[in-house]
Amino acid sequence: MTSEAKFLVIGNGAREDAIVQTLQNKNAEVFIAPGNGSRRGIHLPISASNTEELIKFAKSQENLITIIGPEGPLADGIVDKFRDEDLKIVGPTKEAALLESSKLKGLEFMEKYDIPHPTFQSFDNKATALKFLESPPWEKLVIKEDGLKAGKGVYLPSSIEEAREIIKNKFQDGETIVLQERLYGPEASSFAFIYVKDGKAFYVYFTTAQDHKRLKDGDVGPNTGGMGAYAPVELSSENMQIIKDNIFQKTVDGLLKENLEYVGFLFAGLMMTNTGPVVLEYNARLGDPETQVILPLLESDLGNILEKLINGTLKPEDVQIRRGKVAVGVVLAAENYPENPIKGDVIEGIDNIPSDILVSQAGTKMDQEETLTTDGGRILTVVSVEDSIDEARKNVYEAIGHKGIHFRGMQYRADIAKKN
């Protein structure tokens, strides 16, 4: 069954470009606001934060479903405003989006509903946080800023002294400081479709990916919004059961008890510890760059899935993954990313890569001469889908460089999905 709806995708990153591509592959009519240099979708000159104009456009279309890509509009309450106008939209309400938009609220929710999470403490001034560090209960800790930080705002001090310096220099008094126990193990990103509305609650598991956050090979350098990903992640049956029963099921049960409306994607950022999966944080939408590797693995029609989700009729059999396939995605970033990325460099080779290589555009712009140039930090995600990780890695890296896609000062990691 193919979706008969039209779609409006809000955002301008590679995640949104991948969503548009996936919907268009099933012949859906797709608008994107504002989009980027990609030619996919019908571009609307409306910013993701201009809710009034987005609502006006949505009202002008029949059978339109709006999909929110980035976290900002969700935190600002765009879903509430669309629903007030009886418009179909995928995403949680402003209050439900606090699972992501406040690190502290997310952790408190996990604690209340017995969802595996790190132990934590929060402080509303530097003095009490520094006092806590005089005798911390953990050998190593993580420091987090409370609000939305676009994948950043997380500090991993190597010592208590370094932790003190971070708190002194990175926080103002009155800002919430979250300290939590540092856990160890591979990270993973689990995704599900969530429906909590009008006394009904369910989830449908999608898949699990692994993101590579650090800028440089070997997981060193600053944290970024993500430098690449692969999917699916192999999970033991025991860990899969924990993810389903103790994380997603308990989350939808908790949302129902809190009377929070949530019809959309949920992304649980996990640490796969020796004792099982632990939720480090929630994201109230699809991830980036994970979206670019999980959507190519989807056998089912994404548009049809979203229609059924909005109607509260989605079932596990409606979400089918391509059996035996794996996807590897590598992010190409601008020179000086993430601190002060250079813009305006010509992107070359994008039209000469093999047809089975997928490219999702992020920080790109088409200039007046119809030349594609860089216009942000993370520029492109290059993806290969194959029968094995090794094949996918080989194909994706062969498509990058002077014989493939390149631009001046391009940064990328050469170890995405590499086996240890």
Image (tube, rainbow, N blue to C red):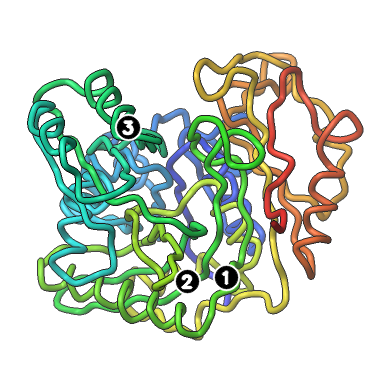
Q: Quadrant of the N terminus?
A: bottom right
Label 3 belongs to which residue? 49
Amino acid residing under circle 1: Asp
Q: Which residue is mark 2?
A: 305
Give above or below for 124 relative to 28: above
Asked whether the viewer can see residue 314, the reply is yes
Q: Looking at the picture, which amino acid does disc 3 mark?
A: Ser
Q: Is residue 10 toward the left or the right of residue 104 in the image?
A: right
Say if mark 2 contacts mark 1, CB within 8 Å.
Answer: yes
Q: Is residue 80 visible?
A: no
Residue 338, horizontal then vertical, whole percent: 52, 24
Crowd class of label 3 (few under 14; some 14 to 19; many from 20; radius 10 Å): some
Q: How many marks?
A: 3
Cα–Cα gap, marks 1 and 3: 28 Å
The one of 86 and 259 positioned closer to us in this rendering: 259
Figure quadrant of residue 332: top right
Q: Which mark is residue 301?
A: 1
Label 1 close to label 3 by CB (< 8 Å): no
At x 69%, y 28%, the residue is 411
Secondary structure of the residue carrying tag 1 is loop
- Distance between mark 2 and mark 1 Cα atoms: 6 Å
The Cα atoms of the two marked residues, 2 and 3, are separated by: 26 Å
